[in-house]
Structure formats: structure tokens, C-alpha cells
């Protein structure tokens, strides 16, 4: 297999992986951006207590599916509010 073909296959694999990730999202990337802004602002004032307290509040206030969203966040490394920012924000911004 030549280099060009390997690059094409790698590009296709990464694109497929990105599409699968996007399909798995519990809500839109725009809502994720709102969540990240809310958490960032809130943590500046209150700090992280190593729970998803502010994430849950945002989800509830916006009538988003709480259980499904929390499960998805935890599967992707968001076990507390600061980890949602640290581990998930870049993944979401990468698919836009």
C-alpha cells in the first residue's frame, strides 16, 4: 500500500470516528457551547466541588435529558464540572 492510500484511509477513519462521535451527542453542539460557558463562568465564582452540580443545574434549567446526558458525559471523561470543560470541550469544538 502506498503512502497516499494510507493517508486517504487514515483521513477516512478519522472522519468516520468524528461522525460517530457527533451522532452520539445527547444534544447539539450549540447547547454544549452554552453549557461550557455556563460552567466556566460559574466555576470562576464558586470553584469545582468535584461533582456535576452545575452541569446538572444547566441540564435541568434547559429541559435536557438529565440521565442520558450525564451518562454520555461520564463515558467521555466528564465526571465533574471542571472535567466537562477539561475533557469534553475540545472534543466538541473539534467537530465544528
Image (cartoon, rainbow, N blue to C red):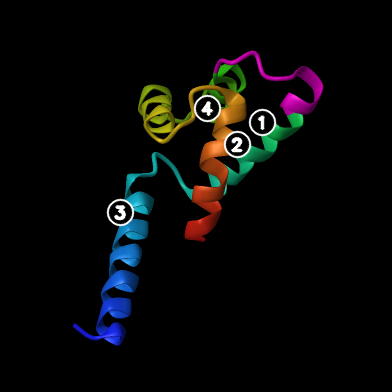
State the CA–CA distance, disc 4 to disc 2: 15 Å
Q: Earlier in the sequence, mark 3 or mark 4?
A: 3
- Horizontal side, residue 6 vs residue 54: left or right: left
Please rate how many residues cluster around mark 2, counting C-alpha atoms within 10 Å: few if below 14, some from 14 to 19, many from 20: some
Q: Earlier in the sequence, mark 4 or mark 1?
A: 1
- Report the residue at 31% width, 70% height from top: 10
Viewer-side label of 3, 4: 3
- Report the residue at 73% width, 26% height from top: 42
Q: Tags 3 and 4 in contact by the CB under 8 Å rule? A: no
Residue under pointer 2: 85
State the CA–CA distance, disc 3 to disc 2: 21 Å
Magenta stretch holds residue 44:
yes
Magenta stretch holds residue 64:
no
| SS at badge 2 | helix
Q: Is 96 drawn above or below residue 28 in the view shown? A: below
Q: Tags 2 and 1 in contact by the CB under 8 Å rule? A: yes
Residue under pointer 1: 39
Residue under pointer 4: 59
Magenta stretch, residue numbers: 42-51
| SS at badge 1 | helix
| SS at badge 4 | helix
- Report the residue at 79% width, 27% height from top: 44
| Residue 8 vs residue 44, the one in the foreground | 8
Q: Earlier in the sequence, mark 3 or mark 2?
A: 3
Q: Is 71 drawn above or below residue 51 in the view shown? A: below
Q: Earlier in the sequence, mark 1 or mark 3?
A: 3
Residue sticking out furthest to the left = 1
Residue under pointer 3: 20
Amino acid at each position: 500500500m502506498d503512502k497516499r492510500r494510507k493517508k486517504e484511509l487514515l483521513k477516512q477513519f478519522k472522519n468516520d470516528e468524528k461522525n460517530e462521535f457527533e451522532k452520539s451527542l445527547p444534544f447539539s453542539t450549540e447547547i454544549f457551547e452554552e453549557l461550557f460557558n455556563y460552567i466556566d463562568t460559574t466555576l470562576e465564582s464558586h470553584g469545582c466541588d468535584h461533582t456535576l452540580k452545575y452541569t446538572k443545574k444547566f441540564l435541568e434549567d434547559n429541559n435536557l435529558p438529565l440521565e442520558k446526558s450525564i451518562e454520555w458525559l461520564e463515558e467521555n471523561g466528564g465526571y465533574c464540572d471542571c472535567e466537562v470543560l477539561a475533557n469534553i470541550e475540545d472534543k466538541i469544538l473539534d467537530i465544528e
